[in-house]
Amino acid sequence: MPKKRPEPLDTQEPEERPSKSQLKREMHALQALGETLIAMKPAERARFPLSDDMLRAIEETSRIRSHEGRRRHMQYVGKLVRKEDLAAIQGVFDSIEQEKEQRDHAFHRLEKWRDRLIGEGDPAVDQFMADYPNADRQALRQLVRNAQRERNQDKPPASSRKLFKLLRDTLAL
């Protein structure tokens, strides 16, 4: 049996470079970020801190029709994204996500109110009016009654949708 040589003790670990595969994954991720920015509407894209070169490249994308030309251009966009402030871009994405979550939460609250109003009737209308005194009580009660009637008769929920729209307008969402 051959003798095993002990491994040398390194007090300093060699600095590990990322593998070629890891670098390719990072470049593909940056290219995907560029594609996401290109797919956005100009008003949404205006929120991002992008350089003039990046904005020109994004505008130029719409003029490219060739598949291969578009592929090369997307690689160029990925290269430009490397020079951007990725932390600031991620911050804007985070704020957009947070706004979306707040909007979703507000819509869930409205759905709960709508379901409660239809289920409980006038007591729930009184509670809603106490919480939101600027609401139109008469329109609210009428839509609640119509929605209850539609539910009992198994009709499409047209009044329920109108009630939701009234609630959304009342809460200014």
Image (cartoon, rainbow, N blue to C red):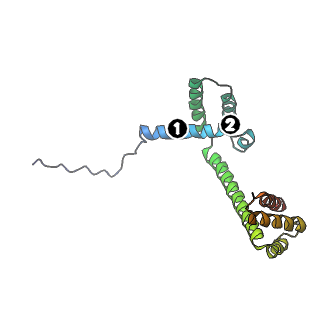
Foreground of the two, 54 or 116: 116
Residue at mark 2: 51
User: Which quarter of the figure is the C terminus placed in?
Assistant: bottom right
Name the residue: 75% across, 63% down.
153
Question: Where is residue 10 shown, x and y percent of the image?
Answer: 31, 50
* Residue at the farthest front position: 153
| Secondary structure category for the residue under label 2 | loop
Residue at mark 1: 28
Foreground of the two, 146 or 32: 146
Question: Where is residue 116 shown, x and y percent of the image?
Answer: 74, 70
Is the residue marked by circle 2 packed among few (<14), some (14-19), or many (20+) residues within 10 Å? few
Q: In front of the other: label 2 or label 1?
A: 1
Is residue 12 toward the left or the right of residue 155 in the image?
left
Q: Amino acid at mark 2?
A: Ser
In this rendering, the answer to whether 3 lies above or below 111 is above
In this rendering, the answer to whether 102 lies above or below 69 is below
Is the residue marked by circle 1 packed among few (<14), some (14-19), or many (20+) residues within 10 Å? some
Name the residue: 68% across, 25% down.
63
Question: Where is residue 82 shown, x and y percent of the image?
Answer: 58, 38
Is residue 108 toward the left or the right of residue 21 in the image?
right
User: Is residue 25 in view from this perspective?
Assistant: yes
Question: Where is residue 6 shown, x and y percent of the image?
Answer: 20, 51
* Residue at the farthest bottom position: 123
Foreground of the two, 41 or 57: 41
| Secondary structure category for the residue under label 1 | helix
